Amino acid sequence: MLFRELSEYYEKLESISSRLSMIDVMGELFKRLRPNEVKNAIYITQGVLAPPFEGIEFGMAEKTVEDSISEATGHPKEKVESLYRKHGDMGVAAMELKKDTKVRGISSKEHTINDVYEIMVKMAITSGQGSKEAKTKMLASLIATATPLEAKYLVKYPLDELRLGVGDSTMLEALSIMATGHRKIKDKLERAYNLCSDLGYVGEVLAEKGESAIERFKIGLFKPIRPALAERLPTADEIMEKMHGECSVDQKYDGFRCQVHKSGKKVKIYSRRLEDTTEMYPDLAQAVIGEMKADSIIFEGEALAYNEDTREFLPFQETIRRKRKHGVEEKVQEMPLHLFAFDMMYLDGESYMEEPYKERRGRLEKVIKGGVIRPAGSTIAKSSKELQQFFQESIEEGLEGIIAKDMNAPYVAGARKFSWIKMKRSYRGELEDTVDLVIVGYYLGRGMRAEFKFGGLLGAVYNKKRDMFETISRIGSGFTEAQMREFKQTLDKIKVDNRPARVDSIVKPDFWVIPKYVVTVKADEITKSPMHTCGREKQEDGSEVGYALRFPRLVGEETFRKDKSVEEATTTKEIIEMYGQQKKVRMEDSGS
Ligand code: AMP
């Protein structure tokens, strides 16, 4: 397929306001591709060059792109810049200037999707002296022969500003339509995706080898598995009931989740978002080679700083200082990490994904020599009293709480299931947990905030069943001045004129943005509200009511939660559960 044709699909997608039509358009697009184009079309639509664990990123500066547009269209740079400022969209600026190009006599070479993708990869990996000029030339040569519409997307893609809003789930349904004409095999595709975390690869296997290859899909070394997630329950009694009277209980550490892949002396450590973070933790990588008695293994653990002298776990705010790309060596000395291993998915050529947890954990403990890597503290609880006691002891040690684990469950990749149930210490007077909200819009500043042109965010939770983002709150406090500037600058790049197709909202912010960023918010309580769409349901009196947050404020070390994708934000289901728990705590407090 030509990139020109792909651009026409993107233009169509941008104007769509329903998720279902989005799936149809994507399905139709996939059907028209050649099998060897599916993978690249998926990456381009996602706005990436490769899955996150491969670490190939554009890192393209706006100035470089402006230079390319100027070179390709013959308009001065100042003109490019002023149009960019006018529209707030470099793609639109490129499109307008292409319509009025000053460069004549260029042969009109038509680029296929694969041509464009390959040039983009080349651009991304060009580095060192003279690389800025080389990148400018490569992009300019693509723009020079493009149609105006094509130019728009050729510019937006490397700037990471494609505003298509096509999520993983939409893509999986569209792939199902490509292969079968209906959405029936979405679950099979999702399973394969959970095992390799590479949507492009899943699409390629489906297009080239068919449905049966998807059914046979297996995990592999150096392809990270989408992590299992925990449900939450507030009391030991409720956990025990779900676990049918017996379970394994782990201490819950508040550090970084690490998925470790080792084969011989090669080690990779993936983050919760499945980025390759090996470079950040040379001490852990070394320990994996020295301490794990296995030739090849995939296992998971939580890394955190631990003070050997005082025998104290350091709080997350301290541990997070190890997550850095520069000055790694000094930090290794200053703040050594421990890795508390809690699950194992693969050992010496065999997948353990389907083995019961007790089997996986038993084997894992046998291959750990001890040292930097240790098994996560755990016990078997046969009554809620035992569970409660272990919880209490863990809290006294300074830990966050516990995670109860179903001893017979397989490893449930990429899903929140009751095979893991967490219970965390609670603070009365405010919500026990923070919530992670997806930014779907923002407000202009008024009064004292007018100078920042930023007054607050519109936050949403993820409704997994509907694959939609439902609003839950406006967030107007907890920002520093620097953060307000950062919000304005970052969100302006993903601003759109109309409500994005996967956002469900009654309120209207000053500006809509494509769901792309997650922030952590603390609130006092969850209330019912007619203003928000989170969990919105018809009441007996015919009115419709959803859930909202009371006194929400931004918290956390980082402005944006870079470790979470929008589909990993707090879900509607979790909010409804938290609301139920909050009611229960109140009833206990008031003695009823
Ligand atoms: P949460 O982030 O609150 O949903 O809790 C789940 C997270 O707890 C996991 O993603 C891990 O990063 C972390 N964790 C800490 N200790 C353990 C453990 N023993 N087993 C599983 N997860 C753990």
Image (cartoon, grey):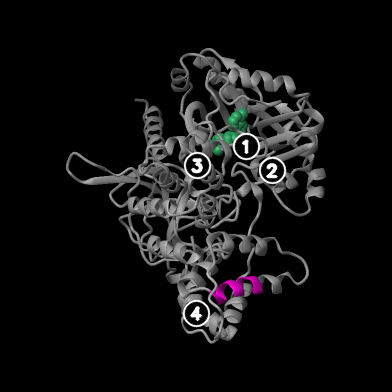
Q: Are marks 3 and 1 in contact (CB under 8 Å)?
A: no
Disc 2 marks a residue whose amino acid type is Thr
Numbered badge on residue 583: none
Closer to the chain start, of discs 2 and 4, is 4
Query: N-terminal of the two: label 3 or label 2?
Result: 3
Tag 3 and tag 2, C-beta contact below 8 Å: no
Residue 240 in view: yes
Name the residue that disc number 2 marks.
319
- Give the alpha-carbon distance from disc 2 to disc 1, as whole Å: 9 Å
Q: Amino acid at mark 4?
A: Lys
Q: Dividing the image into four quarters, tell me where ligand 1 lies.
A: top right
Q: Are marks 2 and 1 in contact (CB under 8 Å)?
A: yes
The numbered dot on residue 254 is 1
- The Cα atoms of the two marked residues, 3 and 4, are separated by 37 Å
* Distance CA(mark 3)–CA(mark 2): 41 Å
> Dot 4: within a 10 Å radius of its alpha carbon, few (fewer than 14), some, or many (20 or more) residues?
many
Q: Callout 3: helix, strand or loop?
A: helix
